[in-house]
Image (cartoon, rainbow, N blue to C red):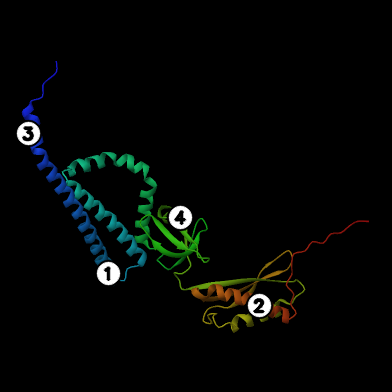
Amino acid sequence: MEREVDPGVIEEFLSQLPEKAFHLGLRVVLAGLAFLIGIQLIRLIRSLLKKALNRSHIDEGAVRFIDSFVKFSLYFVLILTIASGLGVDAASILAILGSASVAVGLAVQGSLSNLAGGVLLLVLKPFMAGDYIKDGQGNEGTVEAVDIFYTQLVTPDNRVVVLPNGTLANGTIVNFTRCGVRRLDIPVSISYEADIRKAREVIMQVLTAEEAVLKEREINVFVDSLGDHGVNLNARSWVAQADFWPVRWRLTEAVKYALDEAGISIPYWQMDVHLDK
């Protein structure tokens, strides 16, 4: 049996429709204005926060990490507030988010691990922006930024390497910049017929003549091993971190020329083949 619709109900609905549409449109417009104003307020808060952090002389990587975290948090609060203004029950939204948190957590567990890793890197500070580091997988470069989920490195040949914070925080990190000075070892091989004392003297003269070598640190040339094709020496000195590679290149070339002038031969790999008649 079909129920007849009361014409009065339809008339009442139609009479109230313009008013309800007006209120709904007004809410949408106000929500849009609130969103635009909220964006400007978030930008202002982030700008003031950055200035305060920079005045506190906090590491640049930590500043970027905190800024990213505050940005996402404020946008979440803004969207939740606008949804409440449109009539959406905030408690219902939070309940839905709570019930879905387990599934979302399993889906983004890698991202959560990276987030936790970013917090550890921020607190423990194994490196800072501008440091030259190398991780356990062999990735190395200058730290450009430490964001919420990833750390960016710039390699010497100007490539950008993006590393997950979770893997980076739980792995081995070698920081080449932290100590300021770095030991420089240059392997030099001479033939067994060469005079070791003379070779040590020639190499020592090259090391002491280099201005970038730190004279207050130990400078030494010693026999490191007896190889298959020659005597392996090690020319050891200390240089500033920023001078490491240029000095290494210069000294390697200078040692070769000095040994040539002194008549000390550098052996090369060779194979002797004897044929029986």
Tag 3 residue: 12
Q: Report the amino acid beneath label 2.
A: Val
SS under mark 2? helix
User: Is disc 1 surrounded by few (<14), some (14 to 19) or many (20+) residues within 10 Å?
Assistant: few
Instruction: Indicate which disc, 2 or 3, sits on the residue closer to the N terminus.
Output: 3
Residue at x-position 17% and y-position 51%: 29
Q: Nearer the viewer, residue 247 or 34?
A: 34
Q: Nearer the viewer, mark 3 or mark 4?
A: 3
User: Is disc 2 surrounded by few (<14), some (14 to 19) or many (20+) residues within 10 Å?
Assistant: many
Q: Is residue 193 left or right of residue 102?
A: right
Mark pair 1, 2: CA separation: 51 Å
**Label for residue 255?**
2
Tag 4 residue: 171
SS under mark 4? loop
Instruction: Indicate which disc, 2 or 4, sits on the residue closer to the N terminus.
Output: 4
Q: Is residue 124 left or right of residue 181?
A: left
Tag 1 residue: 51
Mark pair 1, 4: CA separation: 33 Å
The part of the image, by quadrant, that contains residue 257 is bottom right
User: Is disc 4 surrounded by few (<14), some (14 to 19) or many (20+) residues within 10 Å?
Assistant: few
Mark pair 2, 3: CA separation: 100 Å
| Quadrant (top left/top right/bottom left/bottom right) for the C terminus | bottom right
SS under mark 3? helix
Q: Do the residues bearing badges 1 and 4 touch, measured as CB atoms within 8 Å?
A: no
Q: Nearer the viewer, residue 242 or 72?
A: 72
Q: Report the amino acid beneath label 3.
A: Glu
The part of the image, by quadrant, that contains residue 189 is bottom right
